[in-house]
Image (cartoon, rainbow, N blue to C red):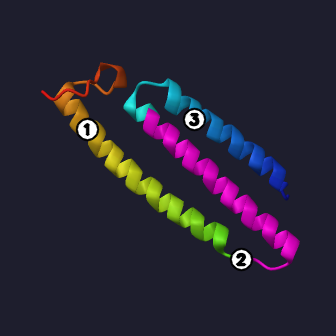
Amino acid sequence: MNVPSEHLLILAAILFAIGMGGFLLRRNVIVVLMSIELMLNAANIVFLAGARQHASESGHWLPDGPVMVTFVIAVAAVEAAVGLALVIALFRRKQTVSLDQLSPTSD
């Protein structure tokens, strides 16, 4: 079964909108990081849909989309590791992961 590229782009738009909503509306650091992951996965879907669309139009496959997806996955893994380390350090220092209860003043 072959899913049309338009459906993949609609799915990517929905995932990106959910991620953007979570990023802008939620105040928990962990939820914000998960929202960023959703937006990165939406970009992955767009890269793969574009590569597949190019392959069907031109008749030959280019590895540009999957290569970009590999880089995005690597960036997402680093972001998750660094983000989790920051969340742990933040919780140890302030005893909260809520962005509303954080202030830029040093203590």
Single out the residue that lies furthest toward the left: 107
Residue position for label 3: 20
SS assignment at label 3: helix
Which residue sits furthest front? Answer: 105
User: Tag 3 or tag 1, which sits nearer the N-term?
Assistant: 3
Most distant residue in the bottom direction: 60
Q: Is disc 1 surrounded by few (<14), some (14 to 19) or many (20+) residues within 10 Å?
A: some
Q: Give the mark toward the camera: 2 or 1.
A: 2
Q: Position of residue 70 (x, y in %)?
A: 54, 66
For badge 3, the amino acid type reads Met
Give the alpha-carbon distance from disc 2 to disc 3, as whole Å. 30 Å
Q: Secondary structure at mark 1?
A: helix
Give the quarter of the figure containing the C terminus: top left
- Which residue is painted at 63% across and 48% down in the image? 42
Q: Residue at x 38, y 56 (%)?
A: 78
Mark 2 or 3, nearer chain start: 3
Task: Tell me the distance, in whole angstroms, between the alpha carbons under discs 1 and 3.
Answer: 24 Å
In front of the other: 105 or 19: 105
Q: Which quarter of the picture shows residue 68?
A: bottom right
Among the two numbered marks 2 and 1 on one chain, the one whose residue lies closer to the N terminus: 2
Label 1 is placed on what type of residue? Ile
Identify the residue under disc 2: 62
The residues colored magenta run 32-61
Other-residue count near label 2 (Cα within 10 Å), few / some / many at <14 / 14–19 / ≥20: few
Image location (x, y in percent) of residue 35: 51, 37
Q: Which residue is mark 1?
A: 88
Q: Could you tell me the amino acid type at mark 2?
A: Leu
Using residue 34 as the reference point, say whether residue 16 is left or right of it. Answer: right
**Horizontal and vertical percent for residue 8?**
76, 50
Residue 34 is covered by the magenta coloring: yes
